[in-house]
Image (spheres, helix red, strand yellow):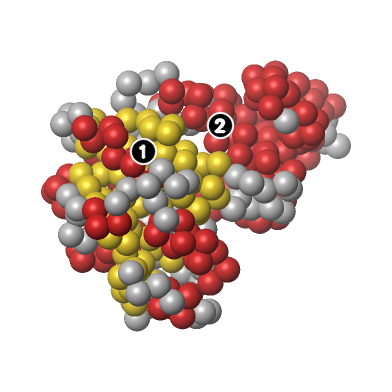
């Protein structure tokens, strides 16, 4: 038995497509169960889920975050292999079959699939290319330490042994779990055949807010796992340089009226930032020329949003 767990909070708009895709898989229906855990939604998410009698519905009385919702689903699941996706994802028709293949190797305890998107907005297309550059990094590695739960699989016994997700993390809880499992010696692999289609943020404001929150919670993850500040199997090293260079650019330009040297500091940092962006720009140019034309300012704004969130998260970690 395979268990597919979908947590959701106020996902009325996307839940139908997710559940319909999960019910229409190439995997025989009697081999898997679907569990939707509603995290105290205030919209019509529960009513949507109730339209699917084949889907087990768990309703939580208080909103406690996706980590807690996934743990509740795990406690009710019957499967030996536990798969996770999100309520704003539409798994490809062979997603379950593809997710299972790495587990034919008894040494594999976890697997990570990929995002795709059918969106046409420039911001969403930029976000998709971000993920694709990270997938290129992961393709070169025989084992990874980073699984995102939008397309994820684990052996149930491993999740239970390590206590599942830490509900104190509202975001990046999947990263924290991945780092914990990797530190314990569990092998996890990248599985690019396991595709889910996703609704990335379609506007610049939503995208930057999302990056800020990711940065904030990533700081708390790194406080728990400081060795991962050196690097992980998912994050480009260039991103670390860009965070520092974006901060230096802003500082130099802000202080430029006080002394001309600050202006040159800001401009020099901006030029260095542009150099670090060249690999992404070349990657984008081969796949989406329109995105490539706007990628440099997008990368700069991304670095500012991530950096601000990271700084606030590190401050919180230092004070607690």
- What element does badge 1 sit on? helix
Residue closer to the observer: 283 or 239 = 283
Quarter that holds the C terminus: bottom left
Residue 170, position in %: x, y?
A: 41, 59
Q: Residue at x 30, y 44 (%)?
A: 153
> Which is more toward the observer, 244 or 61?
61
Q: Quadrant of residue 143?
A: top left
Residue at horizontal 46 percent and vertical 69 percent from the top: 9
Disc sitting over residue 151 in the figure = none
Check residue 98 in the rendering and tell me which mark sits there, or answer none: 1
Residue 19 sits in quarter: bottom left
Res 251 seen here: no
Per the model, the C-alpha gap separating discs 1 and 2 is 19 Å
Viewer-side residue, 171 vs 266 = 171
Q: Circle 2 sits in a helix, a strand or a loop, which is it? A: helix
Most foreground residue, 233 or 83: 83
Label 2 crowd (10 A; few <14 / some 14-19 / many >=20): some
Can I make out residue 145 in this image?
yes
Tell me the mark number nearer the camera, choosing from 1 and 2: 1
**140 horizontally vs 123: left or right:** left
What label sits on residue 132 in the rendered view? 2
Q: Position of residue 209 (x, y in %)?
A: 62, 54
- Answer with left or right where residue 246 lies relative to residue 317: right
Label 1: how many residues lie within 10 Å, few (<14), some (14-19) or many (20+)?
A: some
**Lower sequence index among marks 1 and 2:** 1
- Locate residue 308, reporting x and y percent: 60, 47
Q: Is residue 311 above or below residue 183?
A: below
User: What's the residue at 85%, 27% (across, down)?
Assistant: 260
> Which image quadrant for residue 68?
bottom left
């Amino acid at each position: 038995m395979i268990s597919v767990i979908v947590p959701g909070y106020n996902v009325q708009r996307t839940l139908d497509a997710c559940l319909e895709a999960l019910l229409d898989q190439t995997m025989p229906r009697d081999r898997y169960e679907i569990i939707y855990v509603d995290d105290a939604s205030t919209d019509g998410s529960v009513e949507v889920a109730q339209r699917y009698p084949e889907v087990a519905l768990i309703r939580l009385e208080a909103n406690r975050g996706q980590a807690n919702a996934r743990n509740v689903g795990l406690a009710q699941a019957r499967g030996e292999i536990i798969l996770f996706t999100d309520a704003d994802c539409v798994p490809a028709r062979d997603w379950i079959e593809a997710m299972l293949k790495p587990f034919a190797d008894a040494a594999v305890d976890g697997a990570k699939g990929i995002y795709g998107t059918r969106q046409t907005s420039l911001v969403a297309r930029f976000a998709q290319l971000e993920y694709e550059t990270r997938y290129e990094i992961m393709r070169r590695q025989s084992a990874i330490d980073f699984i995102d739960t939008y397309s994820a699989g684990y052996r149930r016994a491993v999740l239970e042994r390590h206590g599942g997700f830490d509900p104190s993390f509202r975001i990046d809880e999947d990263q924290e779990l991945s780092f914990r499992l990797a530190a314990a010696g569990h092998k996890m692999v990248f599985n690019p055949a396991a595709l889910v289609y996703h609704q990335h943020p379609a506007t610049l404001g939503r995208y930057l807010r999302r990056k800020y929150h990711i940065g904030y919670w990533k700081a708390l993850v790194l406080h728990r796992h400081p060795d991962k500040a050196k690097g992980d199997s998912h994050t480009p090293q260039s991103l670390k340089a860009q965070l520092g260079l974006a901060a230096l650019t802003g500082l130099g330009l802000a202080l430029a009226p006080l002394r001309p040297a600050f202006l040159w500091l800001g401009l020099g940092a901006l030029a260095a930032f542009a150099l670090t962006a060249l690999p992404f720009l070349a990657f984008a140019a081969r796949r989406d020329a329109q995105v490539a034309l706007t990628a440099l300012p997008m990368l700069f704004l991304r670095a500012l949003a991530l950096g601000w969130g990271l700084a606030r998260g590190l401050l919180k970690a230092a004070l607690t």
